[in-house]
Image (tube, helix red, strand yellow):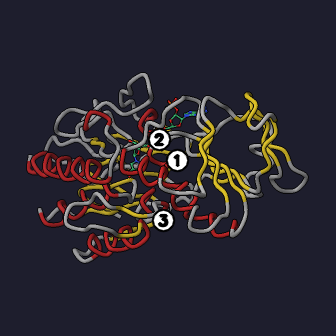
Amino acid sequence: MKHDLAIIGAGPAGLNASVYASRYGIKNIIIGEVSGGLTTTTFDIGNWLGTQKISGMDFAQKSADHAKSYGVEIIAGKVDKIDKNPPQSPFKKGGREGGFRLLFNDGKKIEARAILLTMGTKYRKLGIPGEEELSGKGVSYCATCDGYFYKGKAVAVIGGGDSAAESAVFLSGIAEKIYIIYRKDKLKAESFWVKSIEGNSKIEIIYSTNVKEIKGENKVEELILDNPFNNSNTLKADGIFIEIGADPSTDLAKSIGAQLDDGGYIKIGSDGKTTVDGVWAAGDITTGSNKFKQIITAAAEGAIAANSIQQYLKK
Ligand code: NDP
């Protein structure tokens, strides 16, 4: 398959880049495991201008449909390797370099003149005993995906940022009791979320505390805390939602030699270009937008990259 542009990642950055690219007349393809990326795990989106409230799942579906309405194909698959200027490239003519060849783990190949990396981030783990063993048995990284199982039960949410706060509010519509366990003494989430928590009788915050261990026979039963709560270091809980941020998925970027910052985010210029000619990046995976990780900033970075790619492809 031969395309002007291959977009790897189908979150807001990739989908919005595709909408812009298609409207520029750029033949593009999107490669993404989940259409909509992490937005699919978001409970309610209330800060996308023009839409006061929409569920993450609906937003993701509408975004993917929007991109597809311009004819783009979204394919699932894992890109294992990207070869730059590969032999027998269909683009190698008149002194022009051969673009890129994407090699998939199932043997599929895609040729593209330009690449946009929008793979976003993956959930951070606590790295404590019991976390891996009880993953899927009460340990979860996605409240909107797994919250349903905790009707009338007690759960803990770990973290103090927007994701933790949002998850706790979401879970309060299902579970009976929600403990937010945060290592500092004041939540760092948006005041919108903090106010929603303060007015919620089901949510209790345990400050200045870390979970040291997750215990249970075949499912989560209790958490071991590093500070006593109600005179005990053991907290009974049926589930634990770990919402402690995410790290960029940059294995591919590293493999083609794109420069990363100390946190592992792909360095981009104001035009979305990485340090590798012909490769752009946009969204949560980059150092862009002052590292403000929002749907709107990811989408905007996608648009900016598409605009820059359009100029590049004219050459
Ligand atoms: P953040 O990085 O913003 O917050 C992570 C939280 O987890 C912090 O409170 C951090 O503590 C805590 N933490 C990190 N590592 C550990 C650890 N090992 N043990 C215990 N606690 C830990 O991640 P989020 O997922 O909350 O948000 C990511 C981005 O997405 C942000 O930019 C956020 O604004 C955005 N977002 C926005 C939403 C919105 O409604 N606008 C909704 C959801 C996400 P500490 O504070 O001590 O560093």
Say whether residue 272 is visible: yes
In the displayed image of the protein, which residue is found farthest to the right?
217
Looking at the image, residue 170 sits to the left or right of residue 2; the answer is right
- Circle 3 is placed at which residue position? 76
Location of residue 106 (image quadrant):
bottom right
Q: Secondary structure at mark 1?
A: helix
The residue that disc 2 covers is 161
Question: Which residue shows up at 21% across the image and 61% down it?
Answer: 49
Q: Mark 1–mark 2 contact, CB under 8 Å?
A: yes
Q: Is residue 121 left or right of residue 309?
A: right
**Mark 3 nearby-residue class (10 Å; few <14, some 14–19, many ≥20):** some
Q: Position of residue 71 (x, y in %)?
A: 25, 75
Residue under the point 19% across and 53% down: 303
The answer as to whether callout 1 falls within 8 Å of ligand 1 is: yes
Q: Secondary structure at mark 3?
A: loop
Q: Quadrant of residue 291?
A: top left
* Residue under numbered circle 1: 164
Is the Cβ of the residue at disc 3 closer than 8 Å to that at disc 1?
Answer: no
Q: Nearer the viewer, residue 90 or 103?
A: 103
Identify residue type, mark 3: Ala
Tell me if I can see residue 87 in this picture.
no
The amino acid pointed to by label 1 is Ala
Residue drawn 63% across and 64% down?
A: 146
Question: Label 2 CB, ligand 1: below 8 Å?
Answer: yes
